[in-house]
Every structure is written in C-alpha cells, then in structure tokens.
Amino acid sequence: MVRPLQHEIIARALELIADEAHWTSLVIARTADGKICEWVHPLAARFCAVGALDRAAYELLGPKGDESLKAEKYVLAANNRATDSLPRINDHEGHAAIVSMFKYALAR
C-alpha cells in the first residue's frame, strides 16, 4: 500500500521533533546551540511543528510546491482542529500536543 505524500512528510517531521531536545517554540527553527535560524539552514537542529513539516517536505521533494502546507492542513483536519493554527498549538500547547497530533494524523 502506498502512503500519501502528506503521510511521508508528517512521518519525517515527527522523526525530526520526536525528541523534545529537537523541538522549539516561538520561532521556526534553531541551531543546536539555540540560535534562531531558518528551517532550511544547514545547521538547523530544532524545529517548531511548521518548521519540521517544511524541512521534511524539502528533504523529500526539494524546493518545490506547497506540500508542507497540505501536510499541515491534514494534521489539523485529522485532529478535528481545521480552524485552528498549528503555530498557535505549537507555542501554547507544547511539544506533547504536537507529537500527539502528528501521530494521530499518521494513524488515520
């Protein structure tokens, strides 16, 4: 069975942030020493939920399309939170909420 592209992106994003030491809030990405950077920066080591989806899509597909946005919408819809914001959830509900949402989306 072939998994949809959104599942591949979400699965890779989950790998990136499963360990809380590789997750961040309030910014899209950080280096290992905590400096703010873009998710595409080669030294980026900690990602918010959206940064992880962006990085995962980039790793899988290169710099094209809006697949990370589709994956973000899929995560929200799968968790019955389609009108919510993944950055808000990331920053206000935290790592455990994001990991749980990603896992639930993958199980659907």
Image: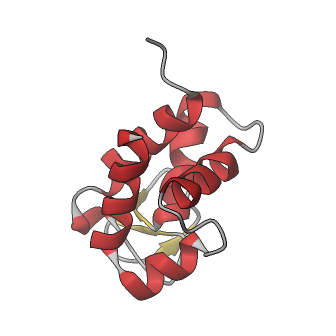
Q: Is residue 70 visible?
A: yes
Q: Residue furthest right?
A: 65
- The residue lying at 46 percent from left, 83 percent from top is 91
Q: Residue furthest top?
A: 1
Q: Residue furthest bottom?
A: 92
- The residue lying at 50 percent from left, 84 percent from top is 26
Question: Is 34 positioned to the left or the right of 3 in the image?
Answer: left
Residue 64 point in image, percent of width and height: 76, 36
Question: Is 68 positioned to the left or the right of 36 in the image?
Answer: right
Q: Is residue 33 visible?
A: no
Figure check: 68 above or below 96: above
Residue 97 point in image, percent of width and height: 34, 71
Residues 103 and 69: in front is 103
Q: Give the quadrant of residue 94.
A: bottom left
- The residue lying at 47 percent from left, 32 percent from top is 8
Question: Is 97 positioned to the left or the right of 44 in the image?
Answer: left
Residue 47 point in image, percent of width and height: 43, 64
Is the N terminus in the top left, top right, bottom left or bottom right quadrant?
top left
Residues 40 and 88: in front is 88
Q: How is the structure coloured here?
A: secondary structure
- The residue lying at 44 percent from left, 56 percent from top is 43
Residues 22 and 107: in front is 107
